[in-house]
Image (cartoon, helix red, strand yellow):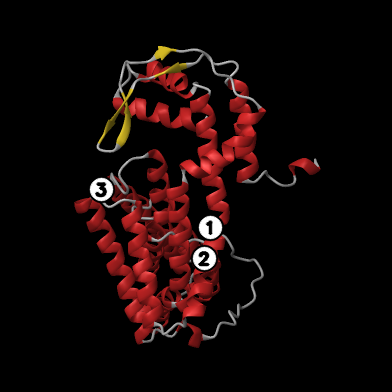
């Protein structure tokens, strides 16, 4: 039972899957599609699959896969480090936290508008998750939103759900998050942030659902506290122990928030109209980080320390990207990836497009 006490981490899982696929190179018949280069992207020629000589992989391939993966994904890994460092400088200023805190403070001053405050805050946190990948930062806001929710006549569930669910649906339905969409589309070799219209629609639907569910629950317990899931449970008054001075939205922080919002708009415009890719996006965020450090009067040494700290936080993500790319190289050099793709095509080619997409989705997760 001790083995099951802790679920394996991502790196362990990837290494195990790599070993599994090395074994499959000895079992699955080898095959290849013909390929062509179009607009700088390698594309498969439909119907060109053919059997080729087997190329089973061994321990040598397993040991070489990580370094091959890092070399192949070097541009994406560099992007992760650079953007992670840039966002660390922005977070160091406390501008994002100050902006959200001031919105929450508004709810205390205007209690008669409380029915609109809950969905507004959910949308705000969702937007943060969808654009720049806000996630762990929400922990500090739970200490603020829970007392706020209680002050408005709700319960701790509403207070915790606002940042947790809001950021979660935003992160899941992200439309310009460089740490998820940017990396995934870079690995897939498709235009960065392509299909944004669909993702914005998905984000809107998920956020609307979150707003409806949480607001409906809040209204219900606002009318009748007995309907709270926590009714009757001993509950002491929270004390957030947070210094409000840490969340002062001064002029410098306002400028930083405006700059962050402008950067997101420029990013969307550049990707949509000028086909910006990883290099341009990384340069954009570096420019934002330099601007932020100047506006906040951050010393060069402090800015560099913040940048390095942010890059360090991306180390696990970089390792996962490199190892995952190495896993793909195993399947390519073992000549089984095209056989797997051809099998999926054979199963789904006679089904409607919507059904085919779902089949491919589930087959990839399987």
Query: Does dot 2 land on a helix, a strand or a loop?
Result: helix
- Indicate the position of residue 168 as horizontal and vertical percent values: 46, 55
Question: Is 34 left, or right, of 163 in this rendering?
Answer: left
Examine the rendering and report whether any part of residue 217 can be seen: no
Q: Residue furthest right?
A: 2
Q: Which quadrant does the N terminus fall into?
A: top right
Q: Say the numbered circle drawn on residue 86.
A: none
Q: How many C-alpha atoms fall within 10 Å of the one at disc 3: few (<14), some, or many (≥20)?
A: few
The residue positioned 31% from the left and 57% from the top of the image is 280
Q: Say the numbered circle drawn on residue 197.
A: 3
Residue on which the image places disc 2: 310
Indicate whether 186 appears above or below 167: above
The residue positioned 45% from the left and 16% from the top of the image is 31
- Indicate the position of residue 194 as horizontal and vertical percent values: 29, 45
- Indicate the position of residue 211 as horizontal and vertical percent values: 38, 59
Query: Does dot 1 land on a helix, a strand or a loop?
Result: loop
Residue on which the image places disc 1: 314
**Residue nearest the viewer, comparing 149 with 279:** 279
Q: Nearer the viewer, mark 3 or mark 1?
A: 1
Residue 123, image quadrant: bottom left
**Residue nearest the viewer, comparing 175 with 34:** 34
Q: Are marks 3 and 2 in contact (CB under 8 Å)?
A: no
Indicate whether 330 appears above or below 238: above
């Amino acid at each position: 039972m001790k083995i099951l006490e802790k679920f394996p981490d991502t790196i362990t899982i990837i290494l195990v899957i790599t070993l599994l696929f090395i074994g499959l190179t000895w079992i699955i018949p080898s095959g290849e599609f013909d390929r062509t280069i179009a607009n700088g992207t390698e594309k498969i020629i439909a119907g060109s699959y053919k059997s080729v000589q087997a190329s089973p992989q061994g321990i040598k391939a397993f040991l070489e896969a990580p370094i091959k993966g890092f070399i192949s994904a070097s541009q994406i890994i560099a992007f992760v480090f650079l953007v992670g460092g840039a966002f660390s400088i922005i977070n160091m200023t406390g501008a994002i936290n100050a902006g959200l805190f001031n919105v929450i403070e508004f709810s205390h001053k205007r209690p008669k508008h409380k029915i609109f405050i809950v969905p507004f805050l959910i949308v705000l946190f969702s937007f943060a998750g969808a654009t720049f990948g806000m996630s762990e930062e929400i922990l500090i806001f739970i200490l603020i939103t829970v007392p706020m929710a209680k002050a408005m006549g709700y319960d701790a569930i509403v207070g915790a759900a606002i940042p947790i669910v809001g950021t979660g649906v935003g992160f899941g339905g992200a439309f310009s998050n460089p740490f998820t969409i940017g990396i995934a589309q870079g690995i897939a070799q498709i235009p960065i942030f392509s299909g944004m219209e669909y993702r914005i629609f998905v984000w809107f639907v998920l956020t609307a659902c979150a707003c409806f569910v949480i607001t409906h629950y809040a209204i219900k317990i606002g009318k009748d506290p007995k309907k709270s899931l926590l009714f009757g449970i001993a509950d002491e008054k929270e004390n957030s122990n947070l210094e409000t001075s840490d969340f002062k939205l001064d002029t410098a922080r306002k400028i930083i928030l405006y700059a962050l919002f402008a950067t997101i708009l420029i990013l969307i415009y550049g990707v949509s109209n000028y086909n910006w890719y990883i290099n341009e996006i990384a340069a954009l965020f570096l420019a934002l980080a330099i601007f932020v450090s100047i506006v906040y009067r951050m010393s060069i040494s402090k800015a560099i320390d913040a940048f390095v700290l942010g890059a360090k936080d991306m180390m696990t993500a970089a390792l996962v990207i490199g190892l995952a790319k190495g896993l793909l190289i195993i399947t390519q050099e073992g000549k089984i990836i095209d056989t797997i793709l051809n099998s999926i095509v054979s199963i789904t080619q006679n089904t409607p497009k919507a059904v085919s997409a779902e089949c491919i989705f589930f087959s990839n997760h399987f």
